[in-house]
Amino acid sequence: MLKLIGTDGRKLYSWDLLPGKYSIGRKSDCNFFIQDKTVSRNHAELIITDDLSVITLADNGSHNGTAVNGIRINAPTEIKSGDNIVFGQVEFRIAADDNSVKSKVPTTQLTKDEPEKSLFLDISEALKPLPSKIIDKPEVLPTIFEIAKMLVLSDPKEIMLHKSLKLISKVITSERLAILFTEENSDEVYTAASHITGGKDLGEFRISKTIINKILSDPQAILISDTTQDPQFAAQHSIIMSEMKSAMAVPLFDEEKVHGILYADTSNPLHQYNDDHLRLLAIFGNIIGSRLQNYTLMSEREEKQIIDAELRRASSIQKKLLIKNNPEISGYNLHSFQEQCRAVGGDLYDMYVMPDGKLLFMVADVSGKGMGAALLMANILASFRILYNQPDFNLCDTVKKVSSQLVQHSDSGDYATLFIGLLDPETHHVSYVNAGHNPPMLVKGDGTFKLLDESGIPIGAMEFDLWPEGQVTLDKDDFILIFTDGVTEAESVIGQYGEERLEKYVSKRCNFSAEKIGEYIFQDVLNFIEDYPRSDDITMMIVQRK
């Protein structure tokens, strides 16, 4: 009977292959359930004919792919006994049901012992140029070139690892070659790929923690030329089982980072390893380490691309939440403006004509930066808009309700400064609430101004219900300028833009339209900061009586 046997370095899988159709994947109800994060939920399908003569494997569009004998498959593929199969990064083999096959799936075990008679070599020393007696061997340079080619090939990582070991086996005689990785945030070691020759039962890897630490942290290469001469090996308590006559391990090293370990061993006393073998293995390890670094950079780039795409989407959604066009109110010029310093921001503004014809206008600045601030901004804006059309709408009550919701359903550091006003265009009377926001400027037609000071703390900061309403009346040519601290706290090499500069600048330009005033202020801020990096959103709103 044939079996499908494999390991992810921690768990051994073994399934009988009987006639039928089998699902393979990380989903618990799959016929062959592989509990590894590199395996897709519905990864592949295996079909076996009634007479067991044909076994067909098909990939189900898995994320990390399926490979047969080192080649990624894109169509149903016939497989046979002895074939090597990789699902994601988990290696399997189709094999006869006998104990020798199981032994070809090595597991890894850490021990506390260290070999006494072993050579540790700093990686910089191990990577010195190879002696001519090694270079002159006909198979060495072609193998190095073949492995180096993988630096530019697009093979999945698991296929690259298996190809590398197969190539290395051509120039370094061994019963067992392996690439070992450490678990993330753990000192546990597992076998990521292996290449075994001879079909002999080699048992498990028994790796010394001390050796692992030296290889990974210093980094160093290790050579045990004759395990029988080491008392620790003779007692079968160190790096490998005692029947191994010689072993060596080198770090997969690139740009000061160790990605894993390349390991080789042999039980043949005629193939005892020496310094030259160790240096050659170190060369291979360095090339593989460079390729692994490329995979890391590619993964980071892909993750960044995903994040960038999500940010662009979030930015688009956020911009659509804000009003596109200012409402038209007879006798008034209205202007609103926002320039974000990141893809998403924490400033918000809104204008809305109430059922009774009054104009509601609002500017707020949410605590924090980035995506968190953007989510809080959307929440606050949605909460206010739900309350706009309430028949008993009242500024103070509305602010209290939204603030209370923030306190109950957000963290203590999630709050917002807010200025909200209600204009009656018939009487030109404005009621407002200033919840900890920068005091807006009420600018008169002659350039004099008055600050609309705070009437309470920011919303969401704590349970609070003492926001009294302020009252002002707009005469002809008067306007209210509301802004966030991205204006006054804009920085340059000489300091902050500041309230005083804003007040002087606006007072001298009070006779322009609301839109022009807003444009001039923004340009003056840009002129002030020059090339100094911006750190906050700039948001302004102007309500001007003609």
Image (spheres, helix red, strand yellow):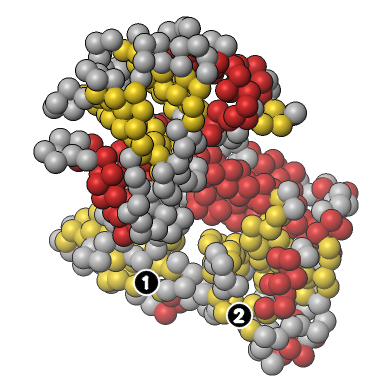
Q: Tell me the tag on residue 451.
A: none
**Outermost residue to the bottom:** 235
Badge 2: few (under 14), some or many (20 or more) residues near its Cα, within 10 Å?
many
Which residue is depicted at the point 16% across and 61% down? Answer: 20
Mark 2 to mark 1: distance in Å? 21 Å
Q: Is residue 232 left or right of residue 6?
A: right
Name the residue tied to disc 1. 13
Name the residue tied to disc 2. 110
Q: Quadrant of residue 541?
A: top left
Q: Is residue 355 left or right of residue 333?
A: left
Q: Is residue 89 above or below residue 101?
A: above
Image quarter where the C terminus lies is: top left
Which residue is depicted at the point 63% across and 84% down? Answer: 111
Q: Secondary structure at mark 2?
A: strand
Q: Position of residue 444 (x, y in %)?
A: 46, 16
Q: Secondary structure at mark 1?
A: strand
Q: Is residue 233 visible in this depiction of the protein?
A: no
